[in-house]
Image: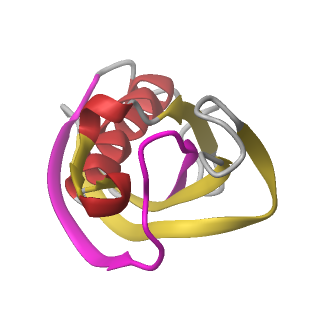
Amino acid sequence: MRTDACQPGLVITHRRYVPFSHAHYAGNLVDGAYSLGLFGDVATELCITTDEDEGLFASYAEVQFLNPVRAGDVLEVRAELVRVGSRSREIAFTATVIARGTPEVSESAARVLDEPLVATTARGTCVVPA
């Protein structure tokens, strides 16, 4: 473990464009599992930063889908280390829509949102080798 990095409050952030190939529902909606997959990616970087190991995801808790994610969105995915056990790392996740396509303007138009939309939140636990 890197004791200098393995402290509650550590934040890792990723940004990702949501491709149209991930739309599954009317209105170009993306399923909730898309955000959970991104949470796994950002958790992996957090574990590499804290423990120099990818770690393994053990569980999710308190998953909430608060706003839709659509193809053409830009998501900011945030992982914050909230608790450090001997092998476990409890992480708070947030996926926020920071930009959205505006097809009513033109086919390729998009804009950064004045007020980002929190789409998904969760808590998760990862485990790392002793």
- Residue 65, given in percent of the width and then of the height, sits at 36, 75
In the rendered image, the residue lying farthest to the right is 114
| Segment colored magenta | 54-81
Horizontal and vertical percent position of residue 60? 21, 66
Q: Is residue 57 magenta?
A: yes
Residue at 36% across, 60% down: 27
Q: Residue at x 35, y 52 (%)?
A: 28
- On the question of residue 82 being in view, the answer is no
Dividing the picture into quadrants, the one containing residue 32 is bottom left
Q: Is residue 84 left or right of residue 110?
A: left
Q: Which SS does the magenta portion mostly show?
A: strand
Out of 85 and 106, give the one closest to the viewer: 106
Tell me which residue sits at (56%, 33%) in the image: 14
Q: With 6 as the anchor, is 21 left or right in this view?
A: left
Give above or below for 86 relative to 37: below
Report x, y in % for residue 71: 42, 43
Q: Nearer the viewer, residue 2 or 30?
A: 30
**Residue 82, image x and y in percent?**
51, 63
